[in-house]
Amino acid sequence: MKRDSRLSATLHALLHMAGHTRPMTSAELAECMNTNAVVVRRTMAGLRDAGLVRSEKGHGGGWEIACDLSQVTLKDIYDALGAPTLLAIGVHLEHPSCLVERAVNRTLTGAFQEAEALLIEKLADVTLAKLVDEFRAGLTNQRNSKGRLA
């Protein structure tokens, strides 16, 4: 089963954008996200609608961050992507009148809902600024190690 990696890829692109002093083109972001420019434009459109990024057309144009990184959480990005399904597993619905299936589904559904709520809570605890700081700290450590693995 293919996993939905849009959140991870989008965060990757946003960190690249945060490190640039100029707008990044869809082609540049596509390279970061390991996808094509059409997917980037579609993804960034949702972020633009949420006020997180902006774009300029033409020479020197591209995508840039339009928000305060310390005010935007990973949950905000997740929501701007359309709140994709977090868990790939589900319940069996072949025999809804079966008491065993109903008991299993009730228990699993509750567990799935709790797990999703916990994950969304964790996403709400991390800002883009914190993620940028973590990236920059890793970059500094890498530079300080003078080519050796940190």
Image: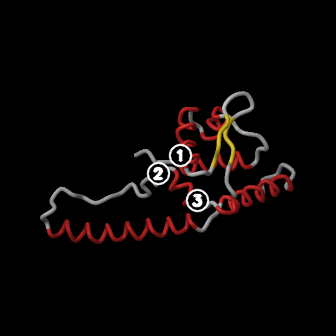
Q: Position of residue 14 (x, y in %)?
A: 66, 48
- Going by the numbered disc 1, the residue's amino acid type is Gly
The residue nearer to you, when weighing 103 against 116, is: 116
Helix, strand or loop at label 3? It is helix
Say left or right for 100 vs 127: left
Secondary structure under tag 2 reads loop
**Rounded to the nearest whole Å, what is the CA distance between mark 3 and mark 2?**
13 Å
Q: Position of residue 144 (x, y in %)?
A: 86, 56
Where does the C terminus fall, quadrant-wise?
bottom right
Q: Which mark is residue 103?
A: none
Distance (Cα) linking label 3 and label 1: 14 Å
Residue 82, numbered circle: 2
Q: Are marks 2 and 1 in contact (CB under 8 Å)?
A: yes
Kindly indicate whether the residue at mark 1 contacts the one at mark 3 (C-beta within 8 angstroms): no
Q: Nearer the viewer, mark 3 or mark 2?
A: 2
Label 3 environment density (alpha carbons within 10 Å; few <14, some 14–19, many ≥20): many
Q: Residues within 10 Å of mark 2 (few under 14, many from 20)?
A: few
Q: Element under label 1? A: helix
Please rate how many residues cluster around mark 1, counting C-alpha atoms within 10 Å: few if below 14, some from 14 to 19, many from 20.
some
Q: Which mark is residue 74?
A: 3
Which quarter of the figure has residue 22? Answer: top right
User: Please, is residue 119 above or below residue 50 in the view?
Assistant: below
Percent x, y of residue 90:
32, 58
Q: Which of the marked residues, 3 or 1, is nearer the chain's N terminus?
A: 1
